[in-house]
């Protein structure tokens, strides 16, 4: 065993928390990509001289570690073939649809799997090389499910946590995977395996019992080498205060007002914001809205649907097909129901800064979040955080992880078109006091369980499952 790193905390995620931005003059720089994960982990990273291991995007960046904003980032380069097989292939065309209830058909290719193993090994090696003795390593998400085991083989001294951001499917689906056993064993390299919901943790433990044959009791797995692994739910959240503050800023309020004005000051603004992904249920929500126009329940003079679809995974075939389908549907709906200066759907295939997102949340009367399956769905929580006026209605799919916490939303089954129509209408026409009561309760929930609490709960539990040999992690610099 060689210990050649000095970091007490190593985060291993598919992507580094920065993007390479190229300027007009050809120069380029790294810019932090603002996500909940970075926000939550940054203070703990700084306090513990943490290191973040991940892919910087692209195919041409070499692997020298660099400092950015007080964090040490270790870039792992992927070749073009690895991007195709490991990332677009096994991660996003095998695991992603399989873990999301087969919303699309997963493809199984042996050369994709081989690439997944190779890349996971490289991530594990880089993490091993950076971790101090007895350090904590926290591995993130479905692209890296083999890393815990590979890392443990290299560094049995480490405390290893894993968190899955997407759903973990029931045995009936998971067993289709030709490499099911290897994935389960990969995850069992961790001391603590975290899921969004208790159901995911239960699916995992049941599969480990059935497929790998280990003894289990409730949320614990007993391994032959006397190690135990705990599987538990840690529902992820957002930087509540950050969003609330942004929403209250004068510039965001002005921008929200001007968005409504540009939309023609309609009575009701419906809003959807999603990565353009087939799990998000964009198609059926737009259909539900268009049927309400057709039925005369809503009128384009008074209602508009703003749909932001952030470009995503554009090299994966299913995503290209989906984009064309949505383009066609929006064209149809606007052709059938729009009037001059009054499109029924204002469709934006683009990504925006966080300020613009907050302004959109502020401008929307009804937020429509209708995934067929979603690990959590942060958009729903962000909307709630931005509604400091306690106004605004949330229509939320039962199949988003967030539905377990946001009980007061208008919950819908996204496969039930009539049910969705009824919920859209009910949310749009609800009594203001009813809307306020629901929003107030949801705001309390998200405020009390923000992303910092999520990270702390996970790391505290990891301490408990495998007590630290040396010093404990410092929660933050200031605390
Ligand atoms: C996965 C799981 C789980 C979107 N467009 C823009 C933008 N966004 C931001 C949103 C939100 C995030 O991206 C999307 O998070 P979601 O949770 O909605 O969905 P996934 O991307 O599928 O995330 C999911 C999550 O991991 C965390 O565990 O909740 O279930 O699938 O924060 O605001 N942000 C900016 N511009 C955009 O155009 N700035």
Image (cartoon, rainbow, N blue to C red):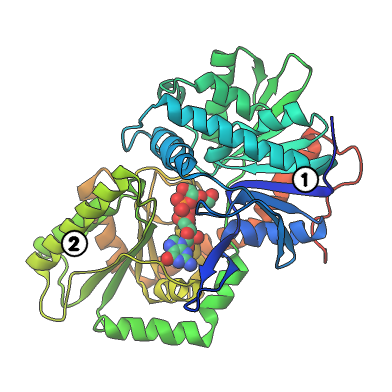
- Find the distance from the CA under tag 2 to the CA under tag 1: 49 Å
Above/below status of 431 relative to 470: below
Query: Residue drawn at (43%, 77%), measured in percent from left and top?
Result: 359
Query: Residue drawn at (74%, 46%), measured in percent from left and top?
Result: 459
Give residue 462's position: percent from left, percent from top.
75, 39
Crowd tier of the residue under label 2, counting other residues whose Cα lies within 10 Å: few below 14, some 14–19, many 20 or above? many
Locate residue 434: give its quadrant.
bottom left
Q: Nearer the viewer, residue 467 or 107?
A: 107
Residue wearing tag 1: 130
Locate residue 340: give its quadrant.
bottom left
Disc with the residue nearer the chain's start (2 vs 1): 1
On screen, residue 303 versus residue 1, left or right, reads left
Q: Nearer the viewer, residue 132 or 455?
A: 132
Seen as rendered, the residue at the extreme left is: 336
Mark 2 lies within 8 Å of ligand 1 (Cβ measured): no
Q: Are marks 2 and 1 in contact (CB under 8 Å)?
A: no
Q: Nearer the viewer, residue 471 or 261?
A: 471
Image quadrant occupied by the N terminus: top right
Query: Residue drawn at (31%, 33%), measured in percent from left and top?
Result: 105
Give residue 321's position: percent from left, percent from top.
24, 47
Query: Residue drawn at (32%, 38%), measured in percent from left and top?
Result: 103
Residue wearing tag 2: 330
On screen, residue 469 versus residue 385, left or right, reads right
Under tag 2, what secondary structure? helix
Give residue 5's position: percent from left, percent from top.
82, 45
């Amino acid at each position: 065993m060689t210990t050649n790193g000095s970091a007490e905390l190593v985060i291993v995620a598919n992507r580094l928390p920065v993007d390479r931005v190229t300027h007009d003059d050809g120069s380029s720089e790294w810019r932090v990509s603002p996500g909940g994960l970075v926000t939550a982990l940054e203070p703990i990273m700084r306090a513990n001289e943490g290191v973040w291991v991940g892919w910087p995007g692209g195919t041409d960046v070499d692997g020298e570690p660099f400092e950015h904003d007080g964090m040490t980032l270790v870039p792992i380069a992927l070749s073009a073939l690895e991007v195709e097989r490991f990332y677009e292939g096994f991660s996003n065309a095998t695991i992603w649809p399989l873990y999301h209830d087969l919303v699309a058909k997963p493809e199984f290719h042996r050369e994709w799997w081989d690439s997944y193993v190779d890349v996971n090994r490289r991530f594990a090696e880089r993490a091993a090389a950076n971790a101090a003795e007895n350090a904590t390593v926290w591995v993130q998400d479905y692209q890296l499910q083999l890393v815990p085991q590979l890392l443990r083989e290299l560094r049995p001294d480490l405390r290893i946590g894993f968190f899955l951001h997407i759903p973990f499917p029931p045995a009936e689906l998971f067993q289709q995977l030709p490499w099911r056993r290897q994935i389960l064993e990969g995850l069992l390299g961790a001391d603590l395996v975290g899921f969004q919901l208790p159901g995911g943790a239960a699916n995992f433990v049941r599969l480990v019992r059935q497929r790998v044959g280990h003894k289990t009791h409730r949320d614990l797995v007993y391994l032959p080498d006397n190690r135990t692994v705990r599987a538990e739910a840690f529902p992820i959240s957002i930087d509540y205060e950050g969003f609330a503050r942004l929403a209250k800023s004068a510039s965001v309020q002005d921008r929200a007002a001007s968005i409504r004005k540009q939309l023609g000051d309609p009575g009701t603004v419906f809003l959807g914001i999603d990565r353009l992904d087939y799990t998000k249920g964009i198609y059926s929500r737009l259909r539900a809205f268009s049927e309400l126009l057709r039925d005369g329940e809503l009128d384009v003079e008074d209602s508009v649907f703003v749909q932001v679809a952030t470009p995503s995974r554009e090299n994966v075939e299913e995503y290209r097909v989906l984009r064309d389908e949505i383009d066609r549907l929006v064209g149809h709906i606007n052709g059938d129901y729009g009037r001059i200066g009054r499109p029924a759907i204002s469709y934006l295939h683009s990504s925006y800064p966080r300020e613009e997102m907050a302004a959109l949340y502020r401008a929307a009367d009804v937020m429509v979040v209708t995934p067929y399956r979603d690990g959590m769905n942060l958009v729903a929580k962000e909307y709630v955080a931005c509604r400091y006026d306690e106004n605004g209605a949330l229509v939320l799919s039962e199949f988003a992880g967030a539905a377990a916490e946001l009980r007061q939303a208008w919950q819908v089954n996204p496969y039930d078109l009539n049910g969705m129509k009824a919920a859209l209408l009910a949310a749009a026409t609800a009594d203001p006091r009813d809307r306020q009561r629901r929003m107030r309760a949801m705001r309390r929930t998200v405020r009390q369980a923000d992303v910092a609490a999520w990270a702390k709960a996970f790391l505290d539990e990891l301490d408990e499952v495998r007590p630290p040999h040396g010093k404990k992690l410092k929660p933050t610099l200031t605390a």
